[in-house]
Image: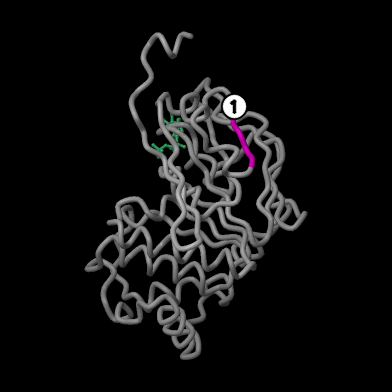
């Protein structure tokens, strides 16, 4: 369980408060989607959560323990981060990259063991990407590298999994692969998952709750209560329609952006 309590953050060189009194939680076995317009503060929030930026006030708790009081080693044993694959450039093989996920569990200066490499290979196999184990990450496609980064995050069996736009830059097939993995992890009931995304329809598919960040506040609630046409108008300035249908006993919803709000609509 991760709980964010009245968090406030502002960059030192800026007058804008990126978030003010931000509070929400993600229970074990649940997925939260974070949505919001470009530049609203999604990455900034992840940086605060991961300890790369210091927030002004408020607190973040993992299983009711404040992260401020937690050692880095304890934090990183529980939390795994999957960065966007486009920003990565590494000279490691898929197997080496996956083994690196075990680093919080390995003493400094100690090399990974044969057992660690076997666990890494097993993790790649679980995700169906063992063929990437000997491939250099620099020679992988965005989708392949994203899957290896997910393997690296999962190998240490984290409680909290944080993913920064894992399906951006991927084709539709690879997007579905990533969404399926998140759905499977969610169904296992062992993780609290936080996923930054630019796709509201993905929030519908994988996230029980959604945090929608805006300039003048935020909404946090069940996804179906957050992702609606009124909020998309207010937070993205677009008119849209939500389309829902059933297929093979499963319900699906997606969002069709129709057009930008007109100046009159904005002023109304
Ligand atoms: N180091 C910094 N100093 C001052 N302002 C910053 C700094 N880094 C980011 N910002 C500003 O903070 C705001 C939030 O940026 P952030 O990258 O968190 O947005 P985002 O929601 O992740 O955007 P996107 O969807 O485009 O990735 C932006 O206005 C950005 O210009």
Q: Determine the residue positioned at 34% across, 29% down.
A: 258
Q: Determine the residue positioned at 48% across, 55% down.
A: 163
Q: Determine the residue positioned at 51% across, 63% down.
A: 183
Return the residue at label 1.
217
Tell whether position 33 is magenta.
Answer: no
| In this view, 7 is above or below 70 | above
| In this view, 267 is above or below 183 | above
Task: Judge left or right: residue 201 versus residue 219.
Answer: left
Identify the magenta region: 217-221
Classify mark 1: residues with Cα within 10 Å, few (<14), some (14-19) or many (20+): few
- Image coordinates of residue 140 in percent, x first then y, are 25, 67
Prevailing secondary structure of the magenta residues: strand
| In this view, 50 is above or below 241 | below
Task: Judge left or right: residue 211 versus residue 43.
Answer: right
Give 172 or 92, whichever is nearer the viewer. Answer: 172
Residue located farthest toward the bottom when viewing the structure as drawn: 114
Q: Determine the residue positioned at 64% across, 40% down.
A: 221
Residue located farthest toward the right when viewing the structure as drawn: 64
Q: Quadrant of residue 257?
A: top left
How many numbered circles are shown? 1
């Amino acid at each position: 369980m991760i709980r964010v309590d009245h968090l406030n953050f502002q960059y030192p060189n800026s007058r804008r408060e990126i978030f003010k009194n931000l509070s929400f939680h993600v229970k074990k076995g649940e997925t939260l989607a974070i949505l919001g317009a470009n530049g609203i503060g999604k990455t900034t929030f992840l940086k605060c959560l991961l300890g790369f930026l210091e927030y002004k006030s408020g607190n973040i708790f993992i299983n009711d323990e404040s992260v401020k009081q937690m050692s880095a080693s304890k934090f990183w044993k529980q939390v795994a981060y999957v960065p966007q694959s486009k920003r990565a450039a590494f000279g490691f093989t898929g197997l080496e990259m996956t083994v690196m996920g075990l680093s919080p569990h390995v003493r400094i200066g100690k090399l990974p063991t044969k057992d660690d490499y076997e666990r890494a290979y097993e993790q790649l196999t679980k995700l169906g990407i063992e063929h990437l184990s000997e491939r250099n990450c620099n020679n992988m496609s965005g989708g392949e590298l994203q899957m290896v980064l997910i393997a690296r995050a999962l190998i240490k069996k984290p409680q909290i999994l944080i993913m920064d736009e894992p399906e951006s830059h991927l084709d539709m097939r690879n997007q579905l692969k990533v969404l399926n993995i998140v759905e499977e992890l969610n169904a296992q009931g062992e993780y609290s998952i936080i996923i930054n995304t630019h796709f509201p329809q993905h929030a519908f598919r994988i996230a029980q709750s959604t945090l929608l960040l805006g300039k003048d506040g935020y909404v946090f609630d069940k996804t179906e209560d957050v992702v609606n046409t009124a909020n998309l108008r207010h937070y993205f300035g677009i008119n849209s329609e939500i389309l829902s249908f059933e297929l093979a006993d499963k319900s699906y919803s997606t969002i069709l952006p129709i057009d930008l709000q007109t100046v009159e609509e904005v002023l109304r």
